[in-house]
Amino acid sequence: MARTALVTGGTRGIGAAISAALKEQGCNVAATYAGNDEAAAAFTKETGIKTYKWDVADYDASKAGIAKVEADLGPIDIVVANAGITRDAPFHKMTPEQWHQVVDTNLTGVFNTVHPVWPGMRERKFGRVIVISSINGQKGQFAQVNYAATKAGDLGIVKSLAQEGARAGITANAICPGYIATEMVMAVPEKVRESIISQIPTGRLGEPEEIGRCVAFLASDDAGFINGSTISANGGQFFV
Ligand code: CAA
């Protein structure tokens, strides 16, 4: 039976590759986005994947959006909390607004995405929760006090959910992508990006599809004994 999957931030970058990989695996996929209607329309045209618009930072909007997805596609079996933003600045220049925007989206957004689907997963005794964290949540990053804090927090969420969901057939795992060739990384000044690439033993940025395939595996029935883990996909840039 086809599983239903929800991917937040699922129309661009890593999220688009995750949505496509889950579809390829036979899932019914719903991809969310926050604002870029044009990119979402192009994504649907290319992949046939249905998109939904809401802000993951808003609990009520997430709950209502998830209810709509479930009415359209059926109960959500797989949830991929991928939506994330950066507001990089050295700490002495970081504003409270930059702090709150990132925390609201990257950390509270994970709560808002998983909390509404959790009771249904518990009842049905099956669930896959996959949170897209980051290498920078593992090692910290210059100009990313806000982002690194949320990505480290994501790992705490996963490790706790893994314990709570295990007996109900739910697994929760995190993936920590390294630097992947997406708009987010391309927005880093070229000189800084080149210096980052020089620190990656494979000598290249990762491809979004390489993260998509990790998610597809964790979402599969074959991954039922993997719970509470963190998969690093960073070309060898950082070992935990
Ligand atoms: N390590 C050490 N020093 C650094 C540095 C780094 N990684 N990056 C910048 N600096 C230095 C600069 O060389 C500069 O030093 P000098 O003044 O001596 O020249 C100083 O720090 C910062 O200078 P500015 O005051 O001009 O900084 P700014 O306010 O203009 O901010 C910046 C610039 C936002 C930090 C910019 O350099 C930047 O975007 N850096 C990249 C940050 C980064 O790696 N973000 C990751 C994005 S990708 C992502 O997040 C996805 C993922 O999960 C992996």
Image: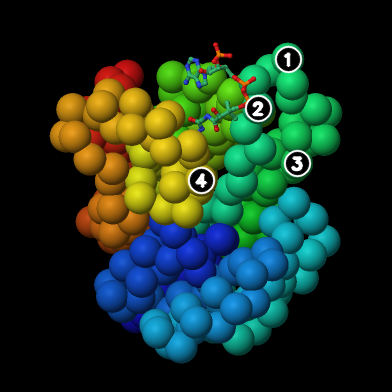
Query: Is 71 left or right of 202, judged from the image as shown?
Result: right
The reply to whether the residue tagged 2 has its Cβ within 8 angstroms of ligand 1 is: yes
Q: Residue shown at 62%/60% (left/top)?
A: 117
Under circle 2, the secondary element is loop
Q: Residue shown at 53%/20% (left/top)?
A: 142
Judging by the rendered image, the residue that carries numbered circle 1 is 92
Q: Are marks 3 and 4 in contact (CB under 8 Å)?
A: no
Judging by the rendered image, the residue that carries numbered circle 3 is 101
The reply to whether the residue tagged 1 has its Cβ within 8 angstroms of ligand 1 is: no
Q: Residue 187 got which mark?
A: 4
Quick check: which quadrant has ligand 1? top right
Under circle 1, the secondary element is helix
Image quarter (top left, top right, bottom left or bottom right) of the N terminus: bottom left
Q: Residue furthest left?
A: 202
Which is closer to the viewer, label 3 or label 4?
4
Q: Nearer the viewer, residue 210 or 199?
A: 199
Q: Residue furthest front?
A: 191
Q: Tell me which corner region of the image, top left, top right, bottom left or bottom right, holds residue 92.
A: top right
Instruction: Give the Cα distance between marks 1 and 4.
Output: 21 Å
Q: Earlier in the sequence, mark 1 or mark 3?
A: 1
Query: Is 175 left or right of 124, judged from the image as shown?
Result: left
The reply to whether the residue tagged 4 has its Cβ within 8 angstroms of ligand 1 is: yes
Judging by the rendered image, the residue that carries numbered circle 2 is 89
Q: Are marks 1 and 3 in contact (CB under 8 Å)?
A: no
Q: Residue shown at 49%/64% (left/top)?
A: 12
Q: Residue shown at 56%/61% (left/top)?
A: 8
Question: Amino acid type of disc 1?
Answer: His
Instruction: Give the Cα distance between marks 3 and 4.
Output: 18 Å
